[in-house]
Image (cartoon, helix red, strand yellow):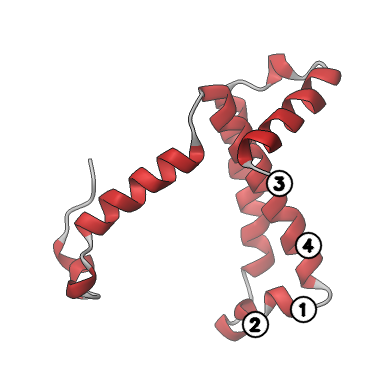
Amino acid sequence: MTLEELAERQRAFISARDWDPFHTPKNLVMALTGEVGELTELFQWLTPDQAARAGHDPELRPKVADELADVLLYLVRLADTLDVDLIEAANAKIDRNEHRFPAAAGRSALRRVPKEQ
């Protein structure tokens, strides 16, 4: 399934429930932030090793998967509402980052490059 197909499925789901009036960009950003917070909560007190193994933990994995799905769904819905092509935007961002952080510079590039405006 592509992101466009996922967005189409979401549109049908939302339309069938008459939720469109509530899916304003502001509300979607707030919901997205809440879901990122729920994902963060799952990792909050884990050690780095425990966090690295979260995808293999039989109790934690389904919770992480659910929260990741919520984040993705709200992000896709927000992009759909704002008519932003996420694949195009992500590729453009990687292009800019390749220029800002050249591979040859390694970690030192992070200290020299000013934050994007």
Q: Which residue is mark 4?
A: 63
Question: Badges 2 and 1: C-beta atoms under 8 Å apart?
Answer: yes
Question: Badges 1 and 3: C-beta atoms under 8 Å apart?
Answer: no
Farthest-out residue, front: 1
Q: Nearer the viewer, mark 3 or mark 2?
A: 3
Q: CA distance from mark 1 to mark 3?
A: 20 Å
Identify the amino acid type marked 4. Answer: Lys
Q: Is residue 73 visible?
A: yes
Q: CA distance from mark 4 to mark 2?
A: 15 Å
Quarter occupied by the C terminus: top left
58 vs 39, nearest the viewer:
58
Callout 3: few (<14), some (14-19), or many (20+) C-alpha neighbours within 10 Å?
Answer: some
Identify the amino acid type marked 1. Answer: Asp
71 vs 89, nearest the viewer:
89
Quarter occupied by the N terminus: top right
Residue plotted at (79% across, 18% down): 15
Q: Is residue 17 visible?
A: no
Identify the amino acid type marked 3. Answer: Asp
Q: Which residue is mark 2?
A: 50
Q: Which residue is mark 1?
A: 57
Q: Which residue is mark 3?
A: 70
Rendering coords of residue 16 (x, y %): 85, 19
Which of marks 4 and 3 precedes in the sequence?
4
Residue plotted at (23% across, 66% down): 110
Rendering coords of residue 35 (x, y %): 66, 47
Q: CA distance from mark 3 to mark 4?
A: 11 Å
